[in-house]
Amino acid sequence: MKWMILGGEGQLGLTMANQLTKLDVDYISLSRSQVDITNQMDIEDWIIREKPNVVFNAAAWTDVDAAETSIDEARKVNSLGPKLIAEACARFGALTIQLSTDYVFSGNADTPWPENAKPSPISVYGKTKAEGERLTLEANPNGAFIVRTAWLYSPWGKNFVKTMARIAVEETRKIEVVIDQVGQPTSAIDLSTRIHLMITNNLAPGIYHGTNSGQASWFELAQEIFNLIGEDSRRVLPINSTQIQRQAERPLYSVLAYDHWMAQGMLPMQNWKDALKDVLPTILQANETGE
Ligand SMILES: NC(=O)c1ccc[n+]([C@@H]2O[C@H](COP(=O)([O-])OP(=O)(O)OC[C@H]3O[C@@H](n4cnc5c(N)ncnc54)[C@H](OP(=O)(O)O)[C@@H]3O)[C@@H](O)[C@H]2O)c1
């Protein structure tokens, strides 16, 4: 099995490459300067040259607020790009793994969203990702996996957990964090391991929810980070989303359900608190060395 990672310099691209190295899997990881996923020739040339069995698309427009004013650009990367990748995979007989997001849902719920719930995005980012899902499934109906994830963190790239850990350790100030958005903090390491397992276990193509289990608000997540580090979690102060001005609206309740994993005989991923405990020491190290 040979894997090809697209968007190889992003947080999840770097994490997946690291996991595949650990698992001794043959792979090539390509950065944006090597493959622009909106360029059909780039994609096809590399697939012809490398003959991957699995194409893992971690490339995306991920600036949720900027997408509100750069609609065409966000759509090109999040909708057209996945379509071109899935078409090329179908043509050359490779599996497509397309990453998606809890932001394809409105957040107007109080029970977890199943995989087959109709997307109801409330932001441009969510709309473009939902379109990317649909186009991927249409273009490679027998070989496409959509993996929706959420609130990703890892020792690589920029993310909320790294930022909070740095504030906890290096600063003494208090920090206001939103309490009315509830989702699933997810270790990019756990997610990468799970996606690899999904392929080695020959799971059926379709939509899966790739998040650590349980649920939390951003406030609870920040408090847990402070507690685990041994800093005073009373420095974390709760605020409501209405108290901060942001261009894009965020879903208030975007917890995802795992019916498809269960139907395929796989348990949900571990609880977010256990995952955080696993990864935090490496995140603290990365902060220390300025990675
Ligand atoms: N991070 C989260 O919390 C989160 C939550 C839910 C879902 N997801 C999904 O998970 C996936 C991975 O996210 P991430 O956190 O790893 O994002 P990330 O760190 O922002 O990485 C995205 C990568 O895509 C690259 N890219 C952008 N446009 C490209 C193009 N046209 N061609 C090739 N590469 C391009 C970016 O390059 P530049 O930096 O040079 O622009 C960046 O390296 C995405 O599909 C995202 O929607 C993430």
Image: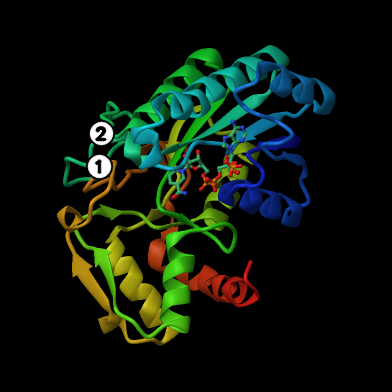
Q: Position of residue 150 (x, y in %)?
A: 40, 48
Measured as percent of width and height from the top left, residue 202 is found at 60, 33
Taking 2 as reference, is 224 above or below it?
A: below
Kindly identify which residue carries mark 1.
Answer: 249
Residue at 48% x, 75% y: name it: 166
Proximity of marks 1 and 2: CB atoms separated by less than 8 Å: yes
Task: Find the residue positioned furthest to the right.
Answer: 49
Q: Which residue is mark 2?
A: 122
The 10 Å Cα crowd at callout 1, few under 14, some 14 to 19, many 20 or more, is: some
Residue drawn at x 61%, y 39% as measured from the top left: 201
Distance Cα–Cα, label 1 vs label 2: 7 Å
Residue 43 placement (x, y as % from top left): 70, 23
Q: Is residue 238 visible?
A: yes
Q: Which picture quadrant has residue 249?
A: top left
Compared with 180, 30 (above or below) is: above
Earlier along the polypeptide chain: callout 1 or callout 2?
A: 2
Q: Is residue 115 something one can see in this rendering?
A: no
Label 2 element class: loop
Nearer to me, 190 or 101:
101
| Vertical arrangement, residue 46 with respect to residue 139, above or below | below
Which three-letter amino acid code belongs to the residue tagged 1?
A: Glu
Tell whether 4 sits left or right of 288: right
**How many numbered marks does the figure carry?**
2
The residue shown at (57%, 57%) is: 157
Residue at horizontal 47 percent and vertical 59 percent from the top: 159
**Residue 287 at what x, y percent from top left?**
57, 73
Mark 1 Cβ and ligand 1 under 8 Å apart: no
